[in-house]
Amino acid sequence: MASIRKIGNKWQAQVRVKGFKGAHRFHTKLEAQEWAFEMERRAGKHGKILTTNTLGDAMEKFSNEISPTHKGERWEQIRLRKLKRDPIAHILLSKLTTQDLQNWIERQQTASASIRRELNLIQSVLRHCRTTWRWMHDDITKDLIKPPPSRHRNRRIWPDEESAIVAQLGYKEDSPLRTNRQKLAVAFLFALETGMRQGEIWKMDWKYINQPKRFVTLPDTKNGSSREVPLSSRALVLLDKLTPKEEGLVFSSKQESASAEFRKAVKKCNIENLRFHDTRHEACTRLAKKYNVAQLAKVIGHKNLNSLQIYHNPTGEELARLLD
């Protein structure tokens, strides 16, 4: 490990790895850091850095310092907590190997898409270990055999499922909203109308909703740019049920709690393989009947038009009606 400290008007870098120990003084801290890193890199060819940091320690540091700057922080924090409970988290970074990561991949029993997302997160943590914190030298992820990409989900949400879920959440068209579960039902129906992501809905602020002109502005989306989402008459009715304000979050409950409540409702309805995110596919499938590909891309925020093919998912019956 390298240590950098100021002695007088100079910066001293000290490096200690197996088979190598050295120190040198520089005029600037940056020069000291660069020298230390180079010495560690050279020594790394002959020995391993003497560090007591584990992969779990690196995940904790990433969780505290790096993840909060990401738009996907909520997902990352949930996954990091899970990963820190895995045996691989207890392995010292100096002893962590490609085979350890390969064994982790083979132990997973989730869909390949989930494995690949978590693996990408681990790779991001290890990249910071190498380039930012200087806890590692080698990229042990470059030779990993990753699971093949999963097929895109094309789960439709049928009218009877939609009705069952909102009923389970206690929602009635002609009744006022009194509980968070009923407001969750409104969020579910609103997602089906707009194709907005769950995270976008939970970040939605009243000040960005233009009801007279029928659109909501999303200033900070997943792909890094803002967009305007048109609001159907049905979407406007749903918003009116929430008592519009000048500003403030439209949905004040925590997104994580809402997600858990939604999963419970789906389970109680005996509906299989349905997630809140499936509302996006269903909404886009419906909107594809009203918009051309370019318009649909603008509404839902996709920059790759080819990716919209997964949303054009009509049933055979629906295609047959177009022939008449």
Image: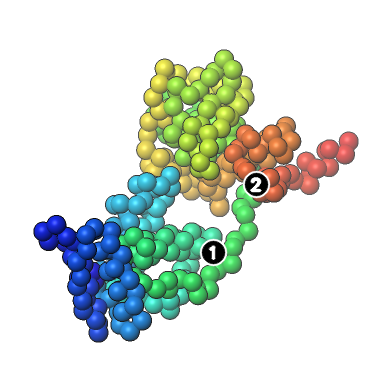
Name the residue beneath numbered marker 2.
304
In percent of the image, x 71 and y 44: which residue is there? 312
Whole-Å distance between the Cαs marked 1 and 2? Answer: 23 Å
Measuring from the top left, give residue 193's x and y in whole percent. Answer: 60, 32
Residue 264 is at least partly visible in this image: no
Q: Nearer the viewer, residue 318 or 43?
A: 43
Name the residue beneath numbered marker 1.
112
Q: Is residue 168 left or right of residue 44?
A: right
Give the residue at the far right of this rendering.
324
Tag in front: 1 or 2: 2
Q: Nearer the viewer, residue 199 or 33?
A: 33
In which quadrant is the C terminus drawn?
A: top right
Measuring from the top left, give residue 182's x and y in whole percent. Answer: 45, 30
Q: Is residue 24 left or right of residue 155?
A: left
Badge 2 element: loop
Residue 313 is at least partly visible in this image: yes
In percent of the image, x 38 and y 42: which residue is there? 257
Q: Is residue 260 left or right of residue 299?
A: left
Give the residue at the far top of this rendering.
212
Measuring from the top left, give residue 141's x and y in whole percent. Answer: 45, 71
Q: Residue 207's quadrant in the figure?
A: top left
Q: Residue 296's quadrant in the figure?
A: top right
Q: Is residue 293 left or right of residue 223?
A: right
Is disc 1 surrounded by few (<14), some (14 to 19) or many (20+) residues within 10 Å? Answer: some
Q: Earlier in the sequence, mark 1 or mark 2?
A: 1
Q: Is residue 142 above or below residue 258?
A: below
The amino acid pointed to by label 2 is Asn
